Amino acid sequence: MDARIDTGGATGRRARARAGAALVAAFAAAFLLGRVSPAEVADLKPRPDALEYEEAARGLLRGDGASLRIEGRRFAPRYPPAMSWAVAAALRATGNEPGAGAVVALTGALVSVAAAWMLAAGAGGPVAAAVAALVVAFSPLHVRWSRAVMADVPSTAACALVGLWSLRRAARDDRSAAGDVAVGVATGLLSLLRLASLAIAPAVVATAALGHAPGGVRQRVERAARTAVGVAAGLLPLAVHQARTYGAPWRTGYGLWHGSGFSVDFATRPAFGATGELANPAFYAKVLAGGGDLHPWPVALLAAAGLFAAVRGPAALRSLAFFSAILLVSLLALHVPFFWQWDRFLLPALPFLAALAGCGAAAIASRTRLHLPAALLLLRLATLAWRGAWRPIEDASTESAWLRTIDAALPPDAVLLVRTDPFHFREILRDGRDEATVSAPGRTWVPLGLDVHRAAIRLWSVAPLPARAGEDAGDAGRWTRDVLAPGLAPADASKAIAALLDERRPVYVATSPRDFEVPEAPALFGRLLGDFTLEPSTALGEWHLWRVAGPSPARAAEASVAGGHVPEARRIPP
């Protein structure tokens, strides 16, 4: 069954025109669905991923290199640098606005749509191209991750382009040694964007060796060897980066921050991050079958039809099916034993699955003349609305909006107890400044509990990067007062707040829905309410800011009777 529809004459011109119109519609849909303002994603979820991509980008703009500045010291991030390079460009173009890096993901979404269109056009013709572009544009998972400062969608686009190049070379019978090495180099360079992108390497090498170009065993082995050498050469920039950053070419940021793990146990039991009781193999099989947000089950059936059409179809379709199958096997081999379970790990396969689905639709349409593209588009719209692709990556916390509200209400030299991280505190409450000045030391942060990075530094003794010549860690350290150590008794915490009042600086306490993450928080706030007069300053939904106006009347009376010292609070209007 040939997946192509006749593209000659008036019928062919109309088919090509419809395919072009579908591509324009897919571009518009991907842009409108994936567009998001920086303020909407300024919380940088999920963490630590999005947080590190943007913070490393800010490090580049500060001249610190792709690094995380925590408590006055520079730390290497856990992720490869290319995404942060792109985010840095976006930040520079938007005036350093938090969340601006989301435009990088949106750009990747548009590239993914175009790549799927071209993959399907080469293997199945204009009808296949139209369907493939629309499948990618309306994928709930693709839309969701197009709205985050994450490398998933950009790496999906990059993998699709490399796959397209590899398949186009096979279709042209390009046997040049330089071409083999070049496509291998491009494959290796994908590792600078996301290490998991290397899952496409076996498909690229196998296509170079077993593509539909004729040749003996020796020629095929030579093509595979040249491509593999190219992949190794493409890995050299990452190896150099890792050697300089982590101490050896084979060491990664995941090892530094203890951010990954593999075990065969996850083939039989749910991994971390699982939302149900499915082990990794069953979970990913369900997603591929249309039981998740990657695509609905009719698209899975059309992809299966595309595979069936490839058995007796044109060579280009056989190559696409061959490439897609190897890519899927590689992705599953990587993520089935991985300690974390997430459907986004299958995103690199989406353009190829969409192209196969398009070819399946074209094969059916060539025999039945059913208007499958239009029907599929309506199905996608319905599925998108049903699955709620616009829901946030994680539960919305409005943390950035809350910190901006605090910023407007807080005196410039205030001391603030709040549950947040050093990156958001510095960028929003200190205008991006680490250093103190003679005239104004700036705001001081009293952390409530440990954020994910400071906890990892203490738990695993994560070592900072070597200090540069003339670098002074003391300046940044001055605006973090870690006086509330984990497990600190509420009475001792109360004494710490009293000591801060003694410094004659305004002291504020912020409460938030995130405080539940700190087991000591309820007892601490209960003690503060008993020991101090807390005057409400401002609020945003469930978030509240209180000024510590001094000791409570009961505590003041006790201290007066005992002849003890009572800190005199400055009167700061709320």
Image (cartoon, grey):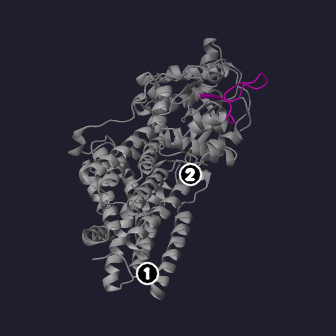
Q: Is residue 520 above or below residue 304?
A: above
Please tell me how many numbered marks the rendered image carries: 2
Q: Looking at the magenta stretch, what is its main secondary structure? A: loop
Tell me where residue 395 appears, x and y as whole percent: 47, 50
Q: Residues within 10 Å of mark 2 (few under 14, many from 20)?
A: many
Q: CA distance from mark 1 to mark 2?
A: 36 Å
| Kind of residue at disc 1 | Thr
Specify the quadrant of the image occupied by residue 297. bottom left
Q: Say left or right for 144 vs 306.
A: right
In this rendering, is residue 71 above or below 111?
A: above
Q: Amino acid at mark 2?
A: Val
Relative placement, left or right, of 191 versus 564 is: left
Magenta part of the chain? 430-445
260 or 529: nearer the eye?
Answer: 260
Secondary structure of the residue carrying numbered label 2: helix
On screen, 470 above or below 41?
above
Q: Of helix, strand and loop, which one carries label 1?
A: loop
The answer to whether one can see residue 535 in this image is no
* 329 relative to 244, above or below: below
Q: Residue furthest bottom?
A: 10
Task: Find out whether residue 437 is within the magenta segment.
Answer: yes
Q: Residue furthest top?
A: 563
Report whether residue 306 is seen: yes
Please tell me which residue is depicted at 51% across the width and 43% down the height of the picture. Answer: 50
Residue 274 coordinates in the image, percent (x, y): 32, 47
Q: Which mark is residue 104?
A: 2
Looking at the rendered image, the quarter that the C terminus falls into is top right
How far across and down, in percent of the image, does residue 563 sit?
64, 11
Q: On the image, numbered disc 1 is attached to which residue?
A: 7
The residue shown at (35%, 66%) is 316
Quarter holding residue 139? bottom left
